[in-house]
Image (tube, coloured by chain):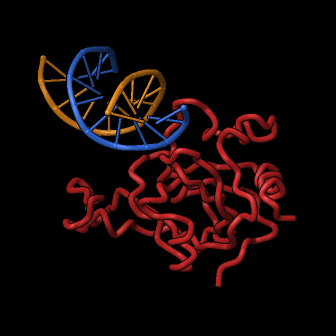
Chain colours: A red, B orange, C blue
Amino acid sequence: MSAINPNAKQAWLVKSEPDDYSFADLQRDGASPWTGVRNYQARNWMRDSMCIGDPVLFYHSNIPTPEVVGIATVASTPYPDPTQFDQASEYFDPKSDPNGPRWILVDIAAVELLPKTIPLSVLRNDPKTNTLPTTQRGTRLSLHPVPIEVFHHICNQGGIS
DNA sequence: GCCAACGTTGGC
DNA sequence: GCCAACGTTGGC
């Protein structure tokens, strides 16, 4: 059972297309390796900065109303993404060397569904959240840091006290 | 479905 | 090391 570390110094946001993998899927699975991230900056954060127990906002992208839907947490230390060596996977990377894997991930675990989801439009209209990369036009990072106080603010907005 | 913005690739 | 071409992300 994974829980958020109340003393965590850093929170995060991860994006997922719900048609591909939704927060409900994560709740069903309990936890899941965060596979398929193929962006070096995002990889570096997983490899170097994400700590077990860090809070995570789970965001649904590529839908009519993109929104933060749930709370999750980092549930493992970093390790190589197994899909990079799986020829059957859409994430297979022929250039990755098993002796020095290119793609590193952590496990993400579901914590709770937000009673009230928070649409991107609301994040953009709130001065406390409108500096998040996800609210910036053109930002395609699928994973990025969120200041811990902003995380708590978003939880409050979402109906969690 | 469109397209702007961005990251990556590869030729030179 | 530059930069044009390309592929992908993701809002709309």
> Residue A41, image x and y in percent?
49, 45
Residue at image location 68% in from the left, 65% down from the top: A71
Q: How many marks?
A: 0
Residue at image location 42% in from the left, 55% down from the top: A37
In-image side of A50 versus A127 (left or right): left
> Residue A116, image x and y in percent?
74, 59
- Quarter of image, res A109: bottom right
Residue at image location 34% in from the left, 70% down from the top: A82
In-image side of A61 versus A91 (left or right): right
> Residue A104, image x and y in percent?
43, 61
From the viewer's perspective, is residue A147 above or below residue A36? above
- Quarter of image, res A108: bottom right
From the viewer's perspective, is residue A128 above or below residue A99? above
Of the pair A22 and A142, the residue shown nearer to us: A22
Query: Looking at the rendering, in which quadrant would you find the N terminus of chain A?
Result: bottom right
Residue at image location 27% in from the left, 59% down from the top: A90
Of the pair A126 and A140, the residue shown nearer to us: A126
Q: Residue furthest bottom?
A: A1
From the viewer's perspective, is residue A91 above or below residue A144? below
Of the pair A137 and A55, the residue shown nearer to us: A137
Of the pair A62 and A2, the residue shown nearer to us: A62
